[in-house]
């Protein structure tokens, strides 16, 4: 299929997904704007053709675009959750375990809900998931059905901090309910252990039994099998500050390494005329690994591209990496439209596209005359191109990046495949009864040295915090990448390189001119040990703690906040009450001051903080209700947000 038709199919599919996700647009009515857009696009193609009436390709393109656009609309619309509004309360629930992880507070289950009721009504839970933590030890596995009664709350309840990226992440996974449940209040129905992820825990136990250092084993489990519960919070922060936390996200790099390792093993068994069968036999093992680590959009993209490449080698056909990337994106988005908004999928497509269209043309070494030098330069270019093309997406989503990410990635990315293959070889030999102790020592020393290097880098002030590039900057940067790729793949590209260079300059300027809008204000946190506030201004954040044991006053963003720690009001306190915008009642108050209702000005917010004992708070809330005074309970109603 021509590349232009594939591009049209991909654009039509993405457009259909965007239209289909709109909640107010009817399913069949959404085909009209898609048809209009396709018609205008094809009409422009019609005008640019020299002999438009002699070609049937426009008709074929129109049919293909309309078909895949409709697929995107229906796939996105049918994947929308039936409901996203669930009040906090007691629910009878039932659902199947899609994923689970072991945490210090219990087993965290991701349930695909099949039924949900609060005793009076039954909720429609089509495409709705719940994240529930079992507080007691229970034998749970993938595919089990869990049912019972639990207190559930919406996943979008106000949080202690402004950053709502985690809430957006939950919603992108269809998770709209969270809660805790005791094993005594639920029932687990076992199912046959047919899930590939069941074998992941078998491999984790094999790694744990190996005579390696504990930190090394945790790193191997996290990187090879994608189980981040093994890596400690300090190590995760160290690698994040160093700018290489992406190595823990199982992606195309890991799938490629598994494919290379499997092909290397099969090459020992297949020779001569049978050697091409190794490409076909490699696929089930690679897809088994993908399913075992969770089948994320990034790993599926890599597995589809690898499958297309292996099929081409088996059939002795030429492999086109760019078309393989396009078809992998089409297949993933057609079956899982939510992947369009997944950062893993976005980074995967951008990085691989940049490697194909930018890194390869930039390699100036003749691979026939100097194959080793060509490979060495290619490794450096791959690392630089992947980091260069994806840094702005990382900054856009995570609001931070390390200034040392380039030199560290030049070390980490080439070293990681060698290190992991060495570790896998050692683990295989150990479980075959051939322990090579010196090899285990080398693996431990390599990891310890690399971790020390990352720790030294992260301890210095090399991380840019609270960096908020705007959407305009991201789109300009991606447009510059596309233009640069186009120029590099044209004859004599150096003549017109000024266009992508100037576009990159405009995008860099837009980082300052078009930053993402950040709200200014503060949040009174839900914290049982102290009265704390998170203040946000110009993309920066600061934490304030009200002094304990005495009433105090604070002014933030033009709002006057009074922390009340005694029910006996002095003259100065009463004067402060008359002008306060926010009145926070905490420990030290056992009853509601009788004068409070008369002193509070119109529009002022009165709240009780969890530092106040729950028994006193309940009496205070009842007394305030009798006086007609509205009080917000942070313990029961959640944190308070004040933003302008």
Image (cartoon, rainbow, N blue to C red):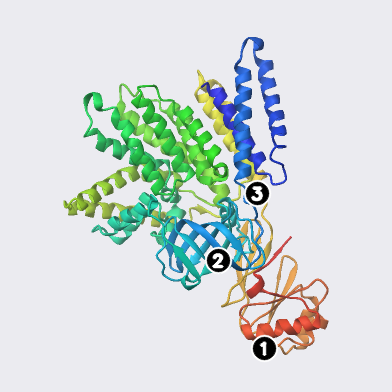
Left or right: residue 142 versus residue 33 is left
**Coordinates of residue 472 in the picture (x, y in percent):** 65, 41
Q: Position of residue 539 (x, y in %)?
A: 63, 56
Which residue has dot 2 on it?
Answer: 179
Residue at (30% x, 25% y) in the render:
370
- 417 w.r.t. 314: above or below: below
Please name the residue shown 47% across and 41% down the image.
387
Relative to 571, does residue 357 appear above or below in the rendering? above
- Picture coordinates of residue 567, whole percent (x, y): 71, 88
Query: In the depicted view, which residue is nearer to us: 405 or 61?
Result: 61
Residue 394 visible to the viewer = yes
Mark 1, residue position: 590
Quick check: 133 left or right of 89?
left
**Circle 3 SS class:** loop
Q: Residues within 10 Å of mark 2 (few under 14, many from 20)?
A: some
Q: Position of residue 643 (x, y in %)?
A: 71, 62
The tag earlier along the polypeptide, 3 or 1, is: 3
Q: Quadrant of residue 580?
A: bottom right
- Identify the element where label 1 is drawn: loop
């Amino acid at each position: 299929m021509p590349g232009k038709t594939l591009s049209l199919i991909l654009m039509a599919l993405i457009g259909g997904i965007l239209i289909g996700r709109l909640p107010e647009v009817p399913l069949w009515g959404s085909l009209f704007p898609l048809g209009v857009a396709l018609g205008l696009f094809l009409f422009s193609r019609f005008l640019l053709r020299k002999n438009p009436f002699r070609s049937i390709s426009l008709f074929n393109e129109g049919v293909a675009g309309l078909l895949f656009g409709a697929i995107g609309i229906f796939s996105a619309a049918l994947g929308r959750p039936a409901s996203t509004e669930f009040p906090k309360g007691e629910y009878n629930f039932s659902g199947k375990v899609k994923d689970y992880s072991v945490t210090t507070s219990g087993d965290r289950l991701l349930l695909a809900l099949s039924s949900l009721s609060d005793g009076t009504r039954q909720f429609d839970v089509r495409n709705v998931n719940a994240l529930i933590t079992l507080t007691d030890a229970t034998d749970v596995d993938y595919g089990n059905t869990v049912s019972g009664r639990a207190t559930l709350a919406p996943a979008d309840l106000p949080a202690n901090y402004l950053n709502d990226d985690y809430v957006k992440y939950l919603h992108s996974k269809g998770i709209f309910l969270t809660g805790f449940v005791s094993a005594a209040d639920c029932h687990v129905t076992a199912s046959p252990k047919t899930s590939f992820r069941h074998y992941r825990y078998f491999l984790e136990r094999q790694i744990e039994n190996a005579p390696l250092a504990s930190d090394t084993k945790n790193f191997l489990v996290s990187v090879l099998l994608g189980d981040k519960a093994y890596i400690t919070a300090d190590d995760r922060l160290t690698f994040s500050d160093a700018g290489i936390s992406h190595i823990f996200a199982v992606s195309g790099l890991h799938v490629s390494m598994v494919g290379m390792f499997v092909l290397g093993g099969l090459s020992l068994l297949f020779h001569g005329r049978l050697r091409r069968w190794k490409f076909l036999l490699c696929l089930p093992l690679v897809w088994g690994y993908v399913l075992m680590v969770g089948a994320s959009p990034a790993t599926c993209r890599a597995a589809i591209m690898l499958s297309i490449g292996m099929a081409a080698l088996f059939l002795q056909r030429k492999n086109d990496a760019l078309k393989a990337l396009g078809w992998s994106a089409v297949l993933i988005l057609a079956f899982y439209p939510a992947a369009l908004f997944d950062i893993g999928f976005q980074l995967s497509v951008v990085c691989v596209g940049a490697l194909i269209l930018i890194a390869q043309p930039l390699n100036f070494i003749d691979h026939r005359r100097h194959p080793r030098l060509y490979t060495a330069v290619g490794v450096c270019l791959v690392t630089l191109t992947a980091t260069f093309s994806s840094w702005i997406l990382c900054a856009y989503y995570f609001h931070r990046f390390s200034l040392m990410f380039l030199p560290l990635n030049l070390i980490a990315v080439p070293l990681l495949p060698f290190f992991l293959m060495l570790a896998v070889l050692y683990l295989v030999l150990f479980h075959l009864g051939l322990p090579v102790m010196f090899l285990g020592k080398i693996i431990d020393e390599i990891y310890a040295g690399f971790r020390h290097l990352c720790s030294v880098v992260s301890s210095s002030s090399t991380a840019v915090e609270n960096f908020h590039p705007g959407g305009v900057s991201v789109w300009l940067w991606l447009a510059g990448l596309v233009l640069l790729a186009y120029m590099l793949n044209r004859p004599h590209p150096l003549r017109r390189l000024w266009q992508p260079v100037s576009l990159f300059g405009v995008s860099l300027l837009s980082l300052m001119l078009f930053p993402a809008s950040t709200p200014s204000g503060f949040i009174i946190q839900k914290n049982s040990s102290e009265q704390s506030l998170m203040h946000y201004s110009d993309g920066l954040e600061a934490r304030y703690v009200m002094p304990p044991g005495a009433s105090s006053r604070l002014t933030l963003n033009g709002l006057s906040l009074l922390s009340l720690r005694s029910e006996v009001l002095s003259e100065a306190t009463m004067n402060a009450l008359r002008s306060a915008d926010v009145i926070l009642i905490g420990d030290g108050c056992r009853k509601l001051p009788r004068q409070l209702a008369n002193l509070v000005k119109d529009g002022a917010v009165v709240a009780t903080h969890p530092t106040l004992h729950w028994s006193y708070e309940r009496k205070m809330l009842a007394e305030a209700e009798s006086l007609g005074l509205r009080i917000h309970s942070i313990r029961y109603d959640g944190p308070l947000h004040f933003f302008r």
